[in-house]
Amino acid sequence: MYEDKILVCKDCGNEFVFTAGEQEFYAEKGFENEPQRCKSCRDARKGARSERTLYTAVCAACGGEAKVPFQPKEDRPVYCSECFAKMKENA
C-alpha cells in the first residue's frame, strides 16, 4: 500500500527517505503531514529544546538547594523537588 518516498529536508536541503513503514506509522497515529526534516535535523531540534537553564534557589520549606527551570522571584516561594512532592501529597 505504501511506497518509500524521497523527501527534501527543509533545514539542510538533503534528501531523505520517508519509508513505507514510517508512512504507515504516521497514518496509524493520524498524522496528516509528511515529515519536513531529516532524522539528523529532527534530532538536533529535539536536543536544542531539551537544553534548559536551571536556576538555583533556596527552598522555602527546608532551606535546602532547589534547582528550578524558571527565574525565581523574591515575592514567590520556591520549593525543592522533595518538598514540592510532599506538598502535592498533602493537598
Image (cartoon, grey):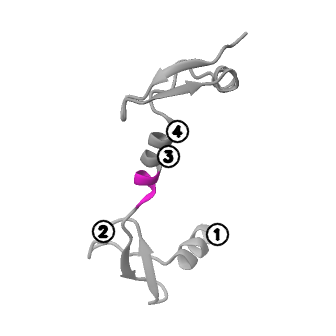
Q: Nearer the viewer, mark 1 or mark 3?
A: 3
Q: Amino acid at mark 4?
A: Lys
Please provide the residue range marked out in magenta.
47-51
- The residue closer to the viewer here, 85 or 6, is 6
Residue linked to disc 4:
39
Q: Which mark is residue 43?
A: 3
Mark toward the start of the polypeptide (4 vs 2): 4
Identify the mark at residue 89; answer none if there is no mark: 1
The amino acid marked with disc number 3 is Asp
Residue at the top extreme of this rendering:
1
Q: Earlier in the sequence, mark 2 or mark 3?
A: 3
Q: Nearer the viewer, mark 4 or mark 2?
A: 4
Point 37% across, 79% down: residue: 56
- Identify the residue position indicated by label 2 in the image: 71
Q: Are marks 1 and 3 in contact (CB under 8 Å)?
A: no
Q: Position of residue 70 (x, y in %)?
A: 35, 65
State which mark lies toward you, 2 or 3: 3
User: Are discs 4 and 3 less than 8 Å apart at CB?
Assistant: yes
Q: Looking at the picture, which amino acid does disc 1 mark?
A: Glu
Closer to the N terminus: mark 1 or mark 2?
2
Magenta-span inclusion, residue 42: no
* Residue at the image point whose x is 63% and y is 18% from the top: 4
Please give the name of the residue rendered at 49% of the width and 21% of the height, measured from the top-left corner.
Answer: 7
Q: Nearer the viewer, residue 27 or 7?
A: 7
Does residue 44 sit above or below 21 in this rendering? Answer: below
Q: Is residue 33 left or right of residue 26?
A: left
In the rendered view, would you say 80 is above or below 45?
below
Estimate the spatial distance between the alpha carbons at disc 2 and disc 3, rounded to whole Å.
27 Å
Picture quarter containing residue 53?
Answer: bottom left
